[in-house]
Amino acid sequence: MRSTELFTKTKKQAPADEVSKNAQLLIRASYIHKEMAGVYTFLPMGLRVLENICQVIREEMNAIGGQELKMTTLQDPEIWQATDRWDDEKVDVWFKTKLKNGSEIGLGPTHEEPLIRAVKPYISSYKDLPFLAYQIQTKFRNETRAKSGVMRGREFLMKDLYSFARTEEEHDELYEKIKQAYFKVYKRLGVGEQTFLTFASGGMFSQFSHEFQTVCEAGEDTIYLDRKKGIAINEEVNDDKVLAELGVKREDLEEVRAAEVGNIFTLKDKFSKPLGLNYLDENNQEMDVLMGCYGIGPSRLVGVITELLGDDKGLVWPYEIAPFKVYIVRIGDSEAVIKATDKLYAELNEANIEAFYDDRDVRPGEKFADADLIGIPIRLVVSEKTLAGDEVEFKKRTDSNIEMVKLVDIIERIKSN
Ligand code: ATP
Ligand code: MG
């Protein structure tokens, strides 16, 4: 894409009403637009990152057999009443509205109930299990606080996967497989080193649930981290009994701020029983399906990655999720420079390397500042000077080093970045 084709422009100033670093940077770089508190539009640049994050998650969920579907936002109160989750006293984040005939409907804050109702007609025998179903979909939650930019939205994207198993062993196996897939996701998103499996309260269904917490100053949670063991515990379960069970010592724990980027739960028959999701086992016995639910917040991750990796110059995206891989700066507007830069841009496109071509008629300094602000991993500069040696300047966003690379070698250099 050429920058003169993109309708958005970067901004010099962060909006005064945004307190979080992620919202400030993402708005300045024109990745997002604030509609109202906790409600953000993803503009073309931001959407590319969000979609890339979703694609990584999708690939890892598909790799363990996850089957993608998409449920509805509008929710029928009936099934939520059956599990006692319709009452605002029980679930305090509901957005509710009314049909023309006066009957109430809700906007889905999570989707266990409707998914159970949708899969029920397909499950009758033990042969129909196990399976994993997931979606990547907009959730609505009437959050009290919405000051963390895209890290806490009232309307936000969630990947929610649900497991359906016959026995506890089968459930545990799926749970472990999904947990391992989550580690792969965070690693590919460039936050693997800062993201820790965190023991949280499992309520009455299992001893623990697990959160995936990314250590980050802007996070809203406090966790206690054993760096050597690579595990953490959250505030709910921070007591001596739990520490002993996990084999960690209090003196090894570091108190840090963190953001929850994922959460996995054993549900047992909590929802399947009241909604009648059961099957006949090998002995013709009616059994409840055992479920688990597993969330990741792609839009929160956009914010967390911004908070973690962004610097005083702007955004920094890991290669895999960057909106473009290469930012081309053209310096000068002589025919030779324009021709050579156009050719380079065409060659990158042909090699399937997504490039953002800054072809504007502005000062080089402005182009360099935008390249840094937008945070694309590789910057190439073409000028009369570089062309004199049949070269192009190559620089990584995370490195101050500038390399001169022959034009004929540039594709190889980018690929081996
Ligand atoms: P939190 O404790 O942060 O309120 P939660 O425990 O309610 O989150 P889940 O219902 O488990 O979250 O949702 C799964 C994932 O969705 C979370 O791990 C998080 O990454 C993301 N998420 C939850 N709430 C929000 C929100 N308001 N805005 C953006 N992402 C969110
Ligand atoms: Mg939580």
Image (cartoon, rainbow, N blue to C red):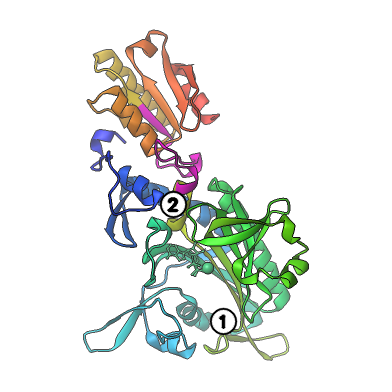
Give the side of residue 250 with respect to residue 70, left or right.
Answer: right
* Circle 2 residues within 10 Å: few <14, some 14–19, many ≥20: many
Q: x, y (%) of residue 184?
A: 61, 52
Ligand 1 within 8 angstroms of badge 1 C-beta: no
Residue type, mark 2 in image: Val
The answer to whether residue 356 is seen in the rendering is no
**311 part of magenta stretch:** yes
Which quarter of the figure has residue 391?
top left
Which quarter of the figure has residue 336?
top left
Q: How far apart are marks 1 and 2 (CA)?
A: 37 Å
**148 part of magenta stretch:** no
The answer to whether residue 71 is seen in the rendering is yes
- Look at the picture and state if 236 lies above or below 350: below
Tell me where the magenta segment starts and ends, as one range. 307-328
- Closer to the camera, 403 or 279? 403
Q: Which label was assigned to residue 123?
A: 1
Residue tagged 2: 302
Q: x, y (%) of residue 207?
A: 69, 75
- Look at the picture and state if 93 lies above or below 317: below
Residue type, mark 1 in image: Ile
Q: What element carries label 2?
A: helix
Give the side of residue 69 with respect to residue 293, left or right.
Answer: left
Mark 1 vs mark 2: give the one in front. 2
- Image quarter of the N terminus: top left
Q: What element carries label 1?
A: loop
- Image quarter of the C terminus: top right
- Closer to the camera, 217 or 335? 217
- Closer to the camera, 166 or 213? 213
The residue under the point 39% across, 13% down is 386
- Closer to the camera, 229 or 337? 229
The residue under the point 37% across, 84% down is 76
Q: x, y (%) of residue 2?
A: 29, 33
